[in-house]
Amino acid sequence: MLVPDTESITKDPSLTFYNGEAAEAFEQFSEARDPDDERVFQTTKQPLNRTFRHVSEEIGVKVTVQRLCWWVATAMNRYGVDAFCGRTPSSVLEKHYLDYSPDSLKDIYDEAGLTVLG
């Protein structure tokens, strides 16, 4: 489970989960990480965009951060959950009677079985 430590005016930063596929990819990525830099993704926008462009050319499908966010949001919306996009219920009834606990959201995420590569 990942919990962002940022704040937003338009939405509540929300937790998210990752699966075994993402864990494997991160292990490969983490070998080049600077141990003195505590950021998860130690990059800036320009190299990241360059990497996405290169991957897009290799696989023949345009991949961007926005498209990946859209894909996850759409997939999770099929399960009736917008909390992965930072959108949690705002009415009093929703706040008190819907279960958006980390355990409940993890169960929903696991049930969705999202994979990028397979």
Image (tube, rainbow, N blue to C red):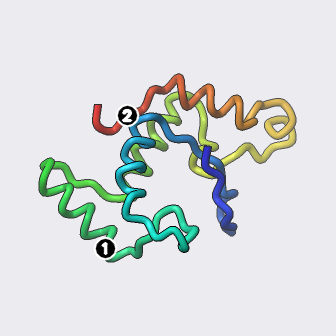
Query: In front: 116, or 99?
Result: 116
Instruction: Write down the residue under mark 1.
Output: 47
Q: Is residue 36 left or right of residue 62?
A: right
Residue 47 image offset from top left, x and y in percent:
31, 73
* Badge 2 element: loop
Residue 22 image offset from top left, x and y in percent:
42, 42
Identify whether 34 is placed above or below 59: below
Chain-order first, disc 1 or disc 2: 1
Residue 65 image offset from top left, x and y in percent:
38, 58
Q: Is residue 11 left or right of residue 78?
A: right
In terms of image quadrants, where is residue 33?
A: bottom left
In terms of image quadrants, where is residue 81?
A: top right
* Badge 1 element: helix
Quarter of the figure that contains the C terminus? top left
Q: Residue at x 35, y 51 (%)?
A: 28
Q: Residue at x 45, y 39 (%)?
A: 74
Instruction: Write down the residue under mark 2.
Output: 115
Query: In front: 92, or 22?
Result: 22
Q: Is residue 96 left or right of residue 80?
A: right
Residue 68 image offset from top left, x and y in percent:
38, 50
Q: Amino acid at mark 1?
A: Pro
Query: In front: 43, or 15?
Result: 43
Q: Amino acid at mark 2?
A: Thr
Quarter of the figure that contains the N terminus? top right
Q: Residue at x 44, y 51 (%)?
A: 69
Identify whether 28 is placed above or below 17: below
